[in-house]
């Protein structure tokens, strides 16, 4: 995946509870020639194989994810003398299974207060920047709903680059209807890679098909303002303990993936979630859903499985 120096600012205007600590296993792209759409019913051909991720995989589960084995993990850490060893051992475990790690440092952003601490980045980066399993850094998650401003996002990005110029910075942005507006801005100097958060499966309305409207706008805006920036889609795999979101069916999961490739031009897909106390249903406790996700990677690594009715 090409990594550009263009970036992405995300300013958030609506308060929301802090997002839980994130750990994510990213399945590396499988370089296989894409299958023609006509060869298999329900398959949309792609010109290049996508990358895949599984969010929130714990260290104990790294070796047990099945085939194909993930190629990137994202792990969150908070600073203390007790967490210095775990961050290294997590990277070591990832390396043993030929995985890379996208790390997230909890101390760098206070979502409850809407503040950032770029000065905390260097001490963390020193622990991981020379590890062979390091992929890059997750800078911020859904800043627009937590009052994290564009200037604050840029301060984080600059601190990451000052500490480690050799690894990319990723920003996770939600609120797709307002992407690129003052409510959810995107610009240069924030990240090298954009991840888009999108959870369309609900109890009350079923599958909300906003991708056809919002994703082309996001794709166009990114191309115009930060050309060359890769975009990944974070798809829904959970239900909330409180709220209208529910666990998708296998068909709905395939539809989310297809919408990401078709309308967003996604370079990859992250399957949310593996384990997180905010959610009461996830891939770890839902083998059928994880099997559906894995099937999309294994059966046609250069194509996307979709339902004819969708």
Image (cartoon, rainbow, N blue to C red):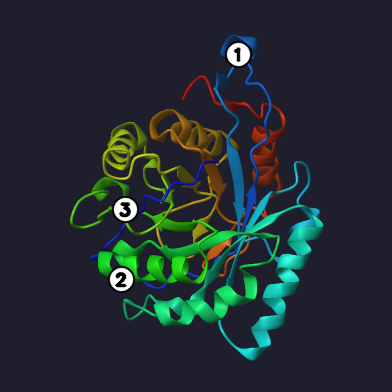
In this rendering, position of residue 12 left or right of residue 250: left
Of 264 and 79, nearer the camera is 79
Rendered residue at 70%/49% (across/down): 70
Question: Is residue 260 at all visible to an observer of this figure?
Answer: yes
Dot in front, 1 or 3: 1
Residue 267: where, in percent of width, then height?
A: 50, 38
How far is mark 1 from mark 2, CA to CA? 45 Å
How far is mark 1 from mark 3, CA to CA? 34 Å
Question: Is residue 242 at all visible to an observer of this figure?
Answer: no
How far is mark 3 from mark 2, CA to CA? 19 Å
Residue hosting label 1: 36
Callout 3: SS: loop
Tell me the tag on residue 175: 3
* Residues at circles 1 and 2 in contact by the CB criterion of under 8 Å: no
Callout 1: SS: loop
Residue 9: where, in percent of width, then height?
A: 31, 58
Dot in front, 1 or 2: 2
Rendered residue at 29%/62% (across/down): 144
Q: Which residue lies most toward the top here?
A: 38
Rendered residue at 60%/48% (across/down): 53
Dot 1 or dot 3, earlier in sequence: 1
Residue hosting label 2: 152
Tell me the tag on residue 69: none
Image position of 134 with respect to 297: above or below: below
Q: Tag 3: Cα neighbours inside 10 Å, few (<14), some, or many (≥20)?
A: some
Residue 171: where, in percent of width, then height?
A: 42, 58
């Amino acid at each position: 995946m090409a990594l550009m120096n263009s970036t992405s600012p995300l300013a958030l205007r609506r308060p929301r509870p802090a997002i839980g600590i994130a750990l994510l296993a990213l399945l590396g792209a499988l370089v296989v020639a894409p299958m023609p759409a006509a060869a298999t019913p329900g398959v949309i051909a792609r010109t290049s194989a996508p990358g895949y991720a599984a969010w929130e995989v714990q260290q104990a589960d790294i070796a047990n994810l099945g085939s194909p084995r993930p190629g990137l993990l994202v792990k969150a850490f908070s600073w203390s003398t007790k967490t210095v060893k775990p961050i290294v051992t997590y990277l070591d475990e990832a390396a043993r299974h030929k995985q890379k790690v996208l790390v997230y440092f909890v101390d760098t952003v206070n979502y409850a207060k809407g503040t950032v601490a770029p000065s905390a980045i260097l001490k963390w980066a020193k622990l991981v920047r020379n590890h062979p399993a390091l992929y890059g850094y997750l800078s911020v998650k859904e800043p627009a709903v937590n009052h994290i401003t564009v200037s604050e996002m840029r301060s984080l990005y600059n601190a990451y680059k000052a500490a480690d110029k050799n690894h990319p910075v990723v920003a996770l942005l939600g609120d797709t209807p307002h992407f690129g507006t003052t409510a959810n801005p995107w610009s240069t100097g924030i990240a090298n890679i954009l991840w888009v958060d999108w959870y369309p499966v609900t109890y009350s309305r079923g599958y909300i098909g906003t991708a056809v409207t919002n994703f082309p706008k996001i794709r166009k805006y990114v191309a115009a303002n930060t050309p060359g920036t890769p975009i990944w889609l974070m798809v829904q795999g959970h239900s909330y303990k409180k709220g209208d979101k529910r666990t998708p069916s296998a068909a709905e999961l395939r539809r989310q993936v297809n919408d990401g490739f078709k309308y967003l031009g996604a370079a990859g897909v992250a399957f949310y979630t593996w384990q997180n106390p905010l959610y009461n249903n996830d891939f770890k406790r839902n083998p059928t859903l994880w099997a559906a996700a894995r099937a999309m990677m294994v059966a046609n690594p250069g194509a996307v499985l979709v339902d004819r009715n969708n």
